[in-house]
Image (cartoon, rainbow, N blue to C red):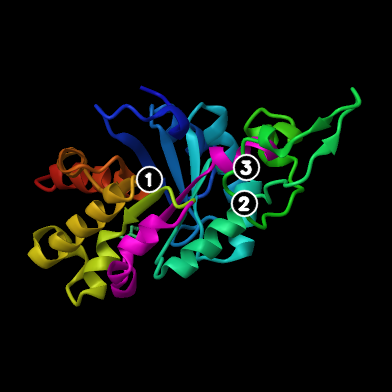
């Protein structure tokens, strides 16, 4: 079952992850060992600071799963810290416009080299040998940590990271919904990921009731269609296996199956309830 995001492209089954909101390398390692394709390290709403993010990313990758960091917002510093920790991908909350999405891509991609460089054999190496050529941005070079997480040399990492790291953006605001087709078409945006609780809130409904509200479900379908029409992946926040099954059948590619807090709270609630009579 265990695969990383990079090779998890079998359309017959969803790409599955777990949502990590609590800090700890041991927790990250144990979650990855469950057989998930990815572990989402939540630095937006989770209790995960920069050091804990580094620890979680390293532990998840060491187990052969993909660490994906949800950054707090579309800020260059957050993108840099997450990718430099070795994240295989980033998830950016509340993406609102195509312009903002283009900036995010630029923060996340190394500049593609344009000029040939002399080689030791006396020839020149042309930029076309650089795999990251198609996408280009302003990401600074420097972290030795990300290459180590990818088990690459720094040179290999710089050549391949633009292609190998996934950029997912959350559609969960009214502006984002209105612009989701344009956002999906931005080169370098790989996935639209729905935050259904925030989307329902933004539409004027109670967040947790999103599953039963037709208008929210129509918006979910619109975002899914926007992603698919642009040839991009679609992801959905889920808290249970039946939701994952339904969303996969609807056409979503990637889902989380709850996460640490959901597991902790639900297991305790069920077990405590079972003892209510004594
Ligand atoms: C949402 O449901 O709004 C999310 O962003 C998941 O945390």
Mark 1 secondary-structure assignment: helix
Residue 182 counted in the magenta span:
yes
Q: Are marks 1 and 2 in contact (CB under 8 Å)?
A: no
Q: Quadrant of residue 35?
A: top left
Mark 2 secondary-structure assignment: loop
Q: Quadrant of residue 49?
A: bottom right
Residue 152 counted in the magenta span:
no
Question: Overall secondary structure of the magenta stretch?
Answer: helix
Q: Which residue is mark 1?
A: 260
Residue 92 falls left or right of residue 61: left
Pick whichever of labels 3 and 1 is earlier in the sequence: 3
Q: Which residue is mark 3?
A: 133
Q: Which residue is mark 2?
A: 136
Please give the name of the residue rendered at 64% of the width and 54% of the height, measured from the top-left corner: 81
Please give the name of the residue rendered at 33% of the width and 74% of the height, measured from the top-left corner: 175
Depth check: give the residue in front, 243 or 118. Answer: 118
């Amino acid at each position: 079952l265990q695969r990383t995001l990079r090779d998890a492209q079998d359309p017959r089954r969803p790409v599955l992850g777990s949502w990590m909101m609590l800090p700890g390398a041991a927790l990250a390692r144990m979650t990855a060992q469950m057989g998930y394709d990815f572990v989402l390290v939540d630095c937006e709403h989770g209790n995960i600071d920069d050091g804990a993010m580094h620890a979680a990313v390293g532990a998840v990758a060491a187990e052969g799963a993909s660490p994906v960091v949800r950054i707090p917002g579309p800020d260059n510093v957050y993108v840099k810290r997450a990718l430099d920790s070795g994240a295989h991908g980033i998830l950016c909350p509340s993406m609102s416009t195509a312009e903002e999405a283009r900036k995010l891509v630029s923060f996340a991609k190394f500049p593609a080299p344009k000029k040939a460089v002399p080689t030791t054999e006396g020839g020149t190496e042309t930029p076309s040998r650089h795999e990251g050529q198609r996408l280009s941005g302003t990401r600074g070079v420097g972290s030795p940590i990300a290459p180590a997480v990818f088990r690459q040399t720094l040179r290999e990492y710089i050549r391949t990271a633009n292609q190998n790291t996934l950029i997912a953006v959350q559609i969960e605001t009214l502006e984002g919904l209105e612009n989701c087709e344009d956002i999906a078409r931005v080169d370098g945006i790989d996935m639209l990921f729905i935050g259904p609780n925030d989307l329902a809130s933004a539409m004027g409904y109670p967040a947790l009731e999103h599953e039963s509200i037709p208008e929210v479900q129509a918006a979910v379908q619109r975002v899914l269609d926007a992603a698919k029409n642009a040839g991009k992946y679609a992801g959905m926040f889920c808290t249970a296996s039946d939701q994952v099954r339904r969303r996969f059948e609807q056409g979503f590619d990637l889902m989380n199956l709850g996460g640490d807090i959901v597991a902790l709270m639900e297991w305790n609630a069920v077990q405590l309830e079972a003892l209510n009579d004594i």
